[in-house]
Amino acid sequence: MVSSTDATQLRRSGSGDDLLKRFSEGDSRALARVISLVENEASGYRNLLSALYHRTGKARKIGITGSTGAGKSTLVDELAKLLVNQGSALGIIAVDPTSPFTGGALLGDRVRMQDLGAQKGVFIRSMASRGSLGGLAKATREVSMVLDAFGKDFLLIESVGVGQVTLDIAEVVDTTVVVLVPESGDGIQAMKAGLMEIADIFVVNKADREGADRIVTELEAVLDLKRKEDDWSYPVVKTEARKGLGVDLLLDHIRRHGEHLSQTGHLKRRKENLLRAEILQLLSEKVQEDIERRLVQGGGFEDIIADILKGNLDPYRAADQLLEQVKGAET
Amino acid sequence: MVSSTDATQLRRSGSGDDLLKRFSEGDSRALARVISLVENEASGYRNLLSALYHRTGKARKIGITGSTGAGKSTLVDELAKLLVNQGSALGIIAVDPTSPFTGGALLGDRVRMQDLGAQKGVFIRSMASRGSLGGLAKATREVSMVLDAFGKDFLLIESVGVGQVTLDIAEVVDTTVVVLVPESGDGIQAMKAGLMEIADIFVVNKADREGADRIVTELEAVLDLKRKEDDWSYPVVKTEARKGLGVDLLLDHIRRHGEHLSQTGHLKRRKENLLRAEILQLLSEKVQEDIERRLVQGGGFEDIIADILKGNLDPYRAADQLLEQVKGAET
């Protein structure tokens, strides 16, 4: 249901029916516009997503994660070139949860991809932390949805491996590729960090460096256990992304993992789980907006703050009281 | 209001009245127990926080943030020694949002602080990313509240500067100290990253290194503008934390900033704003729990998922429908 205010906003921002028409005709400026509206949570963006939803479900979503300096960007570039040469339409999303503070290393790297971006069928978007970190995973999911609806065959979602964000993004994608390097005990680190849980495919990049075989052996030893419990082979691929070596093999494994997901029904289950999480999040956003609007309008909020400051109330009992008020107002 | 289930849970987990009694008598094992219950969001933890709330409001909360390798831990150690020598009771919270992935650098550093932790009146807690990153700021706020209620005079909250988490923690503390180092264009980086907005005091640590004066000059130039708009002096302090140099001066500025906050009414305004955010978050948590319980019990959720998978519905319209159901059930 599009409220009249939302519809007005959408028209005013140059969107609405015309935008959707151009989007469905494959106009890449319309795509960029829709993504901006979604990223900025412009009024009515949920209606846009709602209208686009039935077009989704075709794109294969690949997450590529690993620590800074592991060569993720180079690897993504090389994968992208292969896919473009094979005629695939491609979306690349680079997620940097460490911005704005450590600021822009990943985004800077993207400059060198502009020649790639100029190629037909490749759309590149960088996303830094905005609003909240939970918001970053949400934005990644929504932008992926838009690119999927636009008709992209593959989405490469690159993210710096930082705690929870990495785990959140792993929920969005079909296949997670974890990129390690021979140096710095990266393998041990990955095992400790629970990356074994989310990785479908491991890449040991910069495989010409010392220690590459050691880290592969370490990984294989741990993966042997996992392979016995599961029906997937958890491949470990050695690459030298800078020279393009091993990237075709990686792409083979990515395709094989896609087939595995379809055949075993995992893809369907993943999709269902993602849907549940999405709907709960949407509900929670809506209810929160609802509550905040009522509190601001109702005025009782400031009295409660004053009561707490006087020591007559605490925030926990206050929340209980307000919840009763909100519920009462609905009847 | 303590529901009977919550009360049972609290008793079973060795808490309840006895725990609160020991807590109020200054038993540090009771403190550790309460913090664990809060961190784990054990059943009834909100009632614990509610019961402790009236004891809070005394502790000065100092945030210390900056990039990895800036020497934050050493600086916190030295500040802690000074404060302990002056007879202050102290809580230290080390927040590492980059864990578990890059894993444990900050937490590892903490080992060397154990001799400090053994000192009377110092309580140290490390918090790595768990649940969600938004959850990390929430946990930091709640653990701070518990330490405040326990009677700590100062809380030092150290965090790796990573995007939104840094900004979230800045909301919790009274005074934010941003630690920079001469190398690596840290000053420019800080300006770009919006750290100028949250910093009350700047520290240029490792000030014996080349470039220290340059970064001070850069900072001063930008701060001059800020000082004209504002009534606070935004000091820039040079330290060599490893030798303890400059740390007493930093502590003077921290105390001065505290007085400034009290005199200008900023402290009260900050407290009010924090309260508003806290209550909204509590409400939102409660409503979300409520919704999830109803959806799981109601059973209609799975039908909706099936409808979406069949292509008859999308998640956005589904959320609208469920919201109507939830509201309807309340009347």
Image (cartoon, coloured by chain):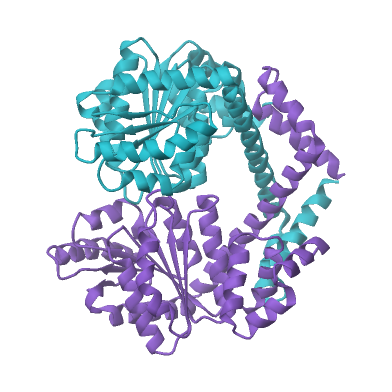
Chain colours: A purple, B cyan
Measured as percent of width and height from the top left, residue A103 is found at 39, 53
Q: Quarter of the image holding residue A65?
A: bottom left
Does residue B245 lie above or below B315 as drawn?
above
Does residue B186 lie above or below A252 as drawn?
above
Q: Quarter of the image holding residue A185?
A: bottom left
Residue A317 appears left or right of B256 = right
Near-viewer residue (A156 or B194) = B194
* Residue at the (76%, 39%) spot, across then down: A296
Measured as percent of width and height from the top left, residue A261 is found at 46, 75
Residue A233, visible in the rendered structure: no
* Residue at the (35%, 41%) spot, across then down: B218
Q: Quarter of the image holding residue A233?
A: bottom left
In which quadrant of the rendered image does the N terminus of chain B lie?
top right
Report the label total: 0
Residue A204 appears left or right of B40 = left
Residue B190 appears left or right of A168 = left
Measured as percent of width and height from the top left, residue B67 is found at 33, 43
